[in-house]
Amino acid sequence: MPRIAGVDVPNDKNIWIALTYIQGVGKHISRAILKEAKVEENTKAKELTEDEISRIAQVIDRDYMVEGQYRRQLSQNIARLRDIACYRGLRHRRGLPVRGQSTRTNARTRKGPRKTVASKKGVKEKR
């Protein structure tokens, strides 16, 4: 397994897909990295030479924010939104969907498992 930016990328995948295992690198950025490093996209990760791996790592270190630095930046951005108490910050704080999704029936991923509220049994109307 080649180790790039502190992450072991899978051997049996094409390198443009294997690079997406690095936090902060998606498909588009992965292809841009390979183009700049002059590496063929469809090469399997296990077939890369040491020179190609070092060129890829060099491009990532020079031009892109990945892994720990990326996570730190993301958490700082969310903390800033919370501190200024904007709408998005309040949604993050309450653990609700941030981007305008409906919460009446769905949003179970953000809200967690259902918390059933017991109905009032035995309370009848007095005549």
Image (spheres, rainbow, N blue to C red):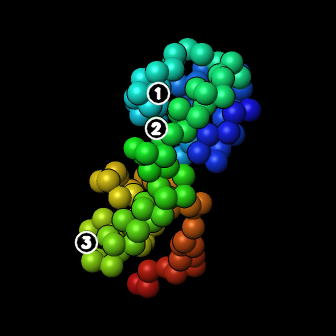
| Residue 106 image position (x, y, % from top left) | 45, 50
* Foreground pick, 119 / 6: 6
Characterize the local packing of mark 1: few (<14), some (14-19) or many (20 or more) Cα atoms within 10 angstroms: some
Residue highlighted by disc 2: 59
Task: Give the Cα separation between the discs numbered 1 and 3.
Answer: 41 Å
Name the amino acid, label 1: Ala
Q: Residue at x 55, y 14 (%)?
A: 42
Residue highlighted by disc 3: 86
Name the amino acid, label 3: Cys
| Residue 21 image position (x, y, % from top left) | 59, 38
Marked residue nearer the N-terminal end (2 or 1): 1
Q: Secondary structure at mark 2?
A: helix
Task: Give the Cα separation between the discs numbered 2 and 1.
Answer: 7 Å
Characterize the local packing of mark 2: few (<14), some (14-19) or many (20 or more) Cα atoms within 10 angstroms: some
Quarter of the picture holding the C terminus: bottom left
Name the amino acid, label 2: Val
Q: Secondary structure at mark 1?
A: helix
Residue highlighted by disc 1: 37
| Residue 4 visible here | yes
**Contact check, label 1 and label 3, Cβ < 8 Å:** no
Quadrant in the picture for residue 115: bottom right
Q: Residue at x 60, y 20 (%)?
A: 14
**Contact check, label 2 and label 3, Cβ < 8 Å:** no
Task: Give the Cα separation between the discs numbered 2 and 3.
Answer: 36 Å
Q: Residue at x 29, y 53 (%)?
A: 100
